[in-house]
Amino acid sequence: MSLLSKIRDTPVYNAVDRYKKLIIAFLLIVLLFVVGEIVLETFFSVGQILLTVKLASFIALFGLCQMVVIASGGSGLDLSVGYMATMTAVFTAAIMDGQNSNLWMAILVALGLGIAVGLVNGVLTAYVKLPPLVVTLAMANILQGIINAYTAGKNITGRPSPVLQIIAAKSTGMFPNILFILLIVTPIVMIIMYKTKWGLKLFGSGANQTAAYLSGVNVKMVRCTAFIISGTLASLMGLVLIGNMGIAFKDMGSNYVMPSIAAVVVGGVSLTGGEGNYVGVLLGAIFLQTLTNLLVALGWGDAGKWTGFGIVLFVLLIVYVSNRRKR
Amino acid sequence: MKNNSVLKRLISNPDFSRLLILILMFVLTAVLQRNFFAMRSIVRNIDSFMPLILMTMGQAVVIISGGLDLSVGTALSLLTCVLTSVMRAGVPITGLYALVVTFAVAMAIGAINGVGIGYLRIPPVIVTFATSFIWLGIALFLRPTPGGETVDWFQAFYRIRNIETAPAFLKAFGEIIPPSLILILIGCLVWWIVSRTRTGRYIYAVGGNSQSAYETGINTAWVQMKACMINSVFIFLTALFFVGQNGSGDARMGDPLTLKAIAAAVVGGIALTGGRGSVFFALIGALIFSFVSKIIFFANIPNAYQTLFGGLIVIIAIAASQIYTLSSRRTGQESKLT
């Protein structure tokens, strides 16, 4: 008894307890690499890891959208991020037309589109009180519809500005540049979420909306803002995606929606809101990308990827979210 | 005086206004569609409305029980893939095997969703979002591209006259009462029977207030699981129709139906918070939704704009219903805090 409580008091135990979800996510990644190495024998290499991290960066940045929305509570998730990014990419391709001088215009358009879509999502969920998943799924359909209407009967023309290509696709030495973006974004996100008043309001609204309301937080406004941030980030991700691919096409963003949510869950962010650590989302994204690589290398393709993602998400929901009645 | 108040009460009754909208849409469609009352167009209309009607009724059962199923679309696709994978063209008995196997798969789908929603109490939208990808993945394993084999008699779920060996009176019967209508009636019958039993009332009780229902001794988890399995029955019936019609399975065909079914249920007065609404009014919601889509089709909107308008209708329909419900029940109870 006393030994147990002594162990509980040690700083190591406290740290392990506090970051256990991050540790689990990290161990899952290691496990995948070990399995991959055993099965394929060429799975574990520095190049492979860097490529994985590069592709995972895109998932992690989309995961940031989800994390902000989830943290604000109200069982929020944003299913429109994929088509949001696609729409921005398709629209800005023609604006940029391969010129750096047009980049500022593209960024303005991206911001405008993101804020507008996020605002509609936010108003419908926070003020009209519709379920976020239904609203954002419908929004995804609408955005897809706009893209279809815009591209009907013509090719999507235009190329990204070279700066975007350098940021998203190129590498410095052996390190992909997108990694540096992530290294800049992560601390900023952590500081905003944990050290500012707004971060406190965001987590407060998610953790206990009544308490937050009674302490003077405008919960509706916070949730609406969370959706606007998500929309804006997703829209900017459209620029990153077109920078990476070099061209814009109709379905370029839609495959990121499921991984972005799964990454958040793998990272141990509580889906009921109120807590979350962005480092966990990064680990979650790396895990999912490693899983994809492994399944693709095994030749299971899309079918294996979606089944794998679905099962991983389902199992982790059982572990982290399930709330069985105690008898 | 008295007449006036009756009229007022009727208009303020949401169910009455739904019927009124339905009649309005019906008349509009009848005006716009040529030969609306010809036997052929009636059959064709029922055929095109049928999937949404059944999927909406199934979704309504889940929503009333306090859940929400985002996996119905991919579950439908998976069932069509299973049906066409089990059947072998020219071997009639395989059709029977396919029915049995697919029904078992449908029940398994409902059970897994039900375990997640009911027993593990994971937020329904999120757990069904996860399972929807499992169904999609398995469907893609079975059918990477649309295709598959069917037996000849399976067309009985679509057009009896297409079966050469069918007796003449059956063919004539199929012309008057199309199989799609019979499938809808089977669906209605299933729910009618369930609603007469204790389970029917429990579904409302659990959706209305899960905690109270639990404390009265209702096995809430089992009730929600049963709701999911009833939903699976409706999805199964829809899958039969699709395979009868197309003769193939497609891992992607069901996706658009998910959102439409939710929206149509909301239009039919099913409260997304659970516990309120009628499954038969969900049917009316699906009809309204179908008529509106039909009218938009007649408005000659270019093909490229159809997804856009589909999405807009969904969001407008859901938002309008929600605002209507919120404004018509401004009496206490609900927390106005957030």
Image (cartoon, coloured by chain):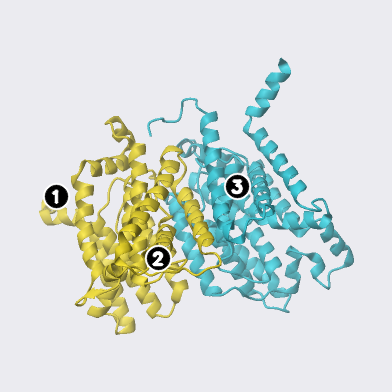
Chain colours: A yellow, B cyan
Are discs 2 and 3 located on one and the same chain?
no
Q: Quadrant of the N terminus of chain B?
A: top right
Question: Would you name the residue on which mark 2 appears?
Answer: A93
Whether residue A319 can be seen here: no
**Can you give x and y, in whole percent of width and height, for residue B46 in the image?**
73, 54
Residue type marked 3: Ala
Host chain of mark 2: A
Host chain of mark 3: B
Taking B181 as reference, is A244 left or right? left
Mark 3, residues whose alpha carbon is within 10 Å: few (<14), some, or many (≥20)? many
Question: Would you name the residue on which mark 3 appears?
Answer: B264
Mark 2, residues whose alpha carbon is within 10 Å: few (<14), some, or many (≥20)? many
Question: Would you name the residue on which mark 1 appears?
Answer: A5
**Can you give x and y, in whole percent of width and height, for residue A218 in the image?**
32, 35
Mark 1, residues whose alpha carbon is within 10 Å: few (<14), some, or many (≥20)? few
Residue type marked 1: Ser
> Residue at the spot x=44%, y=77% of the render?
A300
